[in-house]
Amino acid sequence: MEQPRWLDEREQRAWRGYRRMRRLLDLELARDLMRDAGLSEPDYDVLSDLSETPDQRLRLSELADRMLWSRSRLSHHLTRMQQRGLVTREECAADGRGAVVALTAEGRRAVEAAAPGHVAAVRRHLIDLLTADEIAALDALTHRVVDHLTGPGDARR
Amino acid sequence: MEQPRWLDEREQRAWRGYRRMRRLLDLELARDLMRDAGLSEPDYDVLSDLSETPDQRLRLSELADRMLWSRSRLSHHLTRMQQRGLVTREECAADGRGAVVALTAEGRRAVEAAAPGHVAAVRRHLIDLLTADEIAALDALTHRVVDHLTGPGDARR
DNA sequence: AGCGGATTGATGACATGTCAACCAGATGGC
DNA sequence: GCCATCTGGTTGACATGTCATCAATCCGCT
């Protein structure tokens, strides 16, 4: 830390570009999703993960891990979604402490209605703007960073 | 929207990788910054933008635009930072409605103390994991997306 | 000069996320 | 079997972000 290696020009541009894209893309996708389907991104993510699961249901901890959410956050968010009728909570047969979230019919209807538009927005604002090489690079690089962050130091310090 | 063009395998992987990286990188950088310097990312961004400005001060609206924040968010955040002594508000001579945020000595000290460690973390968890080609690709692609999102449809809808 | 609409920033109510307890049930050593 | 400990999930207090609204001021026009 004594002699910090600052970012050179190109690195600087890449880093700032990343952050700016991140923010703008997020705003845009969230706005589209809310306008077209009445869902927030977190709502959509929960519903989407659930709908991809064989039985339309998951243990809370399992879902939290997949989404990289704290259990607390998930619990709070699910109670809100439950009040809107998108999901229900069930007891877990295998573990008396556990709970299972399940998609309701209405929840399923909501994701299915939202998905095409959301995918189209992701294409329009990101994927279709990239060359095949860039998509490949993005795939490679993001996974490398993810592996780095989940690998050795997964146990935090 | 009738026949949605779903993402193919590679696109899917790139998109999911991006989202996962986004989340993990954010958590990691935020944790490091808080632990080492007692600042949140938003704190750091505000201080950093101010410190790069000639006079260490900016109009609120100017700062909000640069950061892509709502004015409301900025105003709330600044009152919190002000209470911690990192910034002050001043009246704007040129415009009676306006306000100007200025870095305090303590605020300056805080960014300068935080910057080397933060840059090192950005390197360690992202930049230094990428090849030169990937950095160039990231630079190009993010700016293209940013231009797309800020360009024609800047007036939303 | 003076009216009317736009802009600036502040504010309060509310939605969302985080953090630190907390409880109930599981698990493991003895 | 029984106690100590760990885990899964919930909860409440609090930090943060959003949205609608408001007052002050500015600007363009007559």
Image (cartoon, coloured by chain):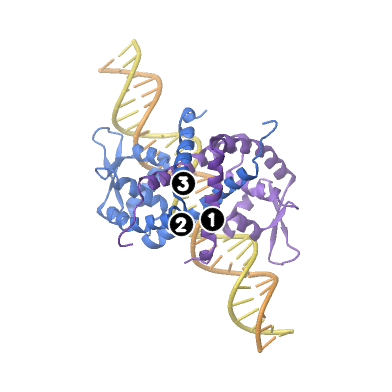
Chain colours: A blue, B purple, C yellow, D orange
Say which amino acid is labelled 1. Answer: Val
Is tag 3's residue or tag 2's residue first in the polypeptide sequence? Answer: 2
Q: Residues within 10 Å of mark 1 (few under 14, many from 20)?
A: many
- Res. B29 in view: yes
Give the chain letter at badge 3.
A
Q: Secondary structure at mark 1?
A: helix
- The one nearer the camera, D7 or D28, is D28
Residue wearing tag 3: A133
Residue B73 percent location from the top left of the image: 57, 55
Residue C6 percent location from the top left of the image: 60, 73
Say which amino acid is labelled 2. Answer: His
Find residue A125 and name its label. Answer: 2
State the count of labels: 3
Residue A115 percent location from the top left of the image: 34, 55
Q: Are marks 3 and 1 in contact (CB under 8 Å)?
A: no
Question: Which residue is found at the position 31% from the left and 58% from the top?
Answer: A113
Find residue B146 and name its label. Answer: 1
Question: Which residue is found at the position 37% from the left and 52% from the top?
Answer: A44
- The one nearer the camera, B113 or B9, is B9
Q: Secondary structure at mark 2?
A: helix
- Foreground mark, 3 or 2? 3
Q: Secondary structure at mark 3?
A: helix
Say which amino acid is labelled 3. Answer: Asp
Q: Residues within 10 Å of mark 2 (few under 14, many from 20)?
A: some
| Image quadrant in which the N terminus of chain A is located | top right
